[in-house]
Amino acid sequence: MKLFSIGAPVGIAAAAALIASGCGGTSTGYGGGSAAAAAAPTSAKAATSIAVRQTKLGKVLVDAHGRTLYLFEADKGGTSACSGGCASIWPPLTSGAAPTGRGGTVSAKIATIAAAGGKRQVTYAGHPLYSYAGDNKPGDTAGQGLNQFGAKWYVLGPSGRKIDDD
């Protein structure tokens, strides 16, 4: 008894390739994949933009996807103190080109610093910027006031100052 026709192995191989191509990808948006994948750092291959969004805490800085951006009080002198496990929960906002500001930001306050892997981390008013893996959708501020990795985390207003609601 013949189980496969001549074309069957080709069809099986094509189906296997199709299934494999759908596996192993990551989501960089909200609502799918793991929290770490959802808050993955912005690609370092293109310029990143920062904007302002109204939240329950007031006007805060957000990335191009509407994710709230935070400062880490352990950062000193414009240098990031968040790496390893910290950076998996608080992914740094990185950019491969000069970052831009829109919608209420002050362009003169936007810069970059050296980051891991040859990337550039975006700063605002001297504060390295991070998103938070626990934020589930654009505009969430679940990281506000958390004390993790040795210091507190706060959202920033367009002035470049932390918004402290403690």
Image (spheres, helix red, strand yellow):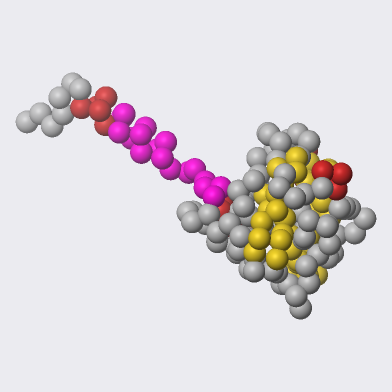
- Residue 78 is left or right of residue 120, and the answer is right
Give coordinates of residue 145: x percent, y percent.
73, 72
| Residue 137 falls inside the magenta stretch | no
Q: Quadrant of residue 82?
A: bottom right
Q: Nearer the viewer, residue 145 or 148?
A: 145
Question: What's the magenta region?
Answer: 13-29
Q: How many marks?
A: 0
Give coordinates of residue 104: x percent, y percent.
75, 50
Residue found farthest to the bottom: 166
- Which residue is at a point 70% across and 41% down the rendered structure image? 48
- Which residue is at a point 75% across and 75% down the rendered structure image? 165
Screen quadrant of the N terminus: top left
Q: Nearer the viewer, residue 81 or 105?
A: 105
Residue found farthest to the front: 104
Residue found farthest to the left: 1
The answer to whether residue 87 is visible is no
- Residue 85 is left or right of residue 127, and the answer is left
Residue found farthest to the right: 77
- Residue 77 is left or right of residue 39, and the answer is right
Screen quadrant of the C terminus: bottom right
The answer to whether residue 45 is visible is yes
Give coordinates of residue 164: x percent, y percent.
78, 72
- Residue 116 is left or right of residue 76, and the answer is left
Q: Quadrant of residue 94?
A: top right
- Which residue is at a point 20% across and 22% down the rendered structure image? 7
- Which residue is at a point 72% across and 44% down the rendered structure image? 102
